[in-house]
Amino acid sequence: MELISGVWESLKAVRDRAPLVHNITNYVVMNNTANALLAVGASPAMVHAREEVADFTAIAQALVVNIGTLSPEWVEGMKLAVATARRVGVPWVLDPVGAGATRYRTTTAGELARQGPAVIRGNASEVLAVAGAAGFTRGVDSTRSSEESLEVARELATSLGTVVAITGRTDYITDGSRVLAVDNGHALMARVTGMGCTASALVAAFLAVEPDAVLAATHALVVLGLAGELAAERSQGPGSLQLHLLDVLYTLDEATVRARARVR
């Protein structure tokens, strides 16, 4: 019950404080993640130019670094933003999209992972790739289950001093010692592009109001999973799911959170 109470308190804090979340993210999901952040109560900004990322990070309350669409210029901007976040104490989230698919992508994810993210949020294959584990990814879709990568995630979290959040049918969040599991969500969410990227953006928003990164990531994933469940009940397919998801994020109330959140 305490965990579920924390979910609502964090969501309420995001709505009350409207934290500015700086997103260096991919072309595919910018609109999706910006709208999700707005719906949940945060203030999104998509700032990528290396000439201004450091200045913008310094005024944000959280940073997302998402490697979905890479280029040397973007990687340089990511590193500048991360350096600023570390210097001024802005919590940041690494989303290692597709890590394991190519050498460049995997190397970039590994370099960023060693720069002190508060949370690394990925699917099972991505987490395994970041950790240097054996295996491969099929594009950006996970070929492993979250359960299969949990022990690796615990080791990775311990070695890097970070929190690792593996999303899948069940989401697992760990700092190496604590492990929380979120069972909210719906299979239809996997038919909407960038749902994992949206998860990372929401984790950043919750990090802006909850200093415990394990709890921040858990609360964010409960909210997104619960929103996906409720949206799926109103949807005929992935197109309408996207619309209903935003509406649920905007209208989600305490009674619904307490009745339907499944976290352990």
Image: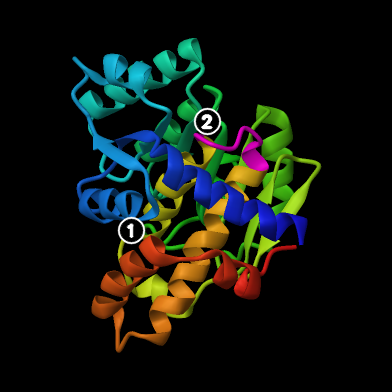
Name the residue at the top extreme: 87
Residue lying at 42% horizontally and 14% vertically, measured from the top left: 83
- The crowding category of the residue bearing disc 2, from other C-alpha atoms within 10 Å (few below 14, some 14 to 19, many at least 20), is many
Colour scheme of the rendered structure: rainbow
Residue 241 seen in the current view: yes
- Ranked by sequence position, the earlier of labels 1 and 2 is 2
Secondary structure predominantly adopted by residues drawn in magenta: loop
Q: Nearer the viewer, mark 1 or mark 2?
A: 1
As drawn, is 227 to the left or to the right of 194? right
Residue lying at 56% horizontally and 64% vertically, measured from the top left: 254
Question: Residue 192: x, y in percent?
Answer: 32, 69
Quarter-wise, where is residue 51 in the image? top left
The residue lying toward the viewer, choosing from 75 and 16, is: 16
Q: In this picture, which residue range is highlighted in magenta?
A: 208-214
Residue 95 seen in the current view: no
Question: Residue 98: x, y in percent?
Answer: 40, 50
The residue lying toward the viewer, choosing from 128 and 81, is: 81
The residue indicated by pointer 1 is 194
Determine which of the numbered discs, if any, sits on residue 10 in the image.
Answer: none
Quarter-wise, where is residue 168 in the image? bottom right
* Image quarter (top left, top right, bottom left or bottom right) of the C terminus: bottom right
Kind of residue at disc 1:
Gly
Please determine whether, in this image, residue 104 is positioned above or below residue 262.
above
Kind of residue at disc 2:
Ala
As drawn, is 144 to the left or to the right of 2? left
Question: Residue 113: x, y in percent?
Answer: 52, 30
The residue indicated by pointer 2 is 113
Residue lying at 46% horizontally and 37% vertically, measured from the top left: 94
As drawn, is 39 to the left or to the right of 113? left
- The crowding category of the residue bearing disc 1, from other C-alpha atoms within 10 Å (few below 14, some 14 to 19, many at least 20), is many
Please determine whether, in this image, residue 124 is positioned above or below residue 71.
below
Element at badge 2?
helix
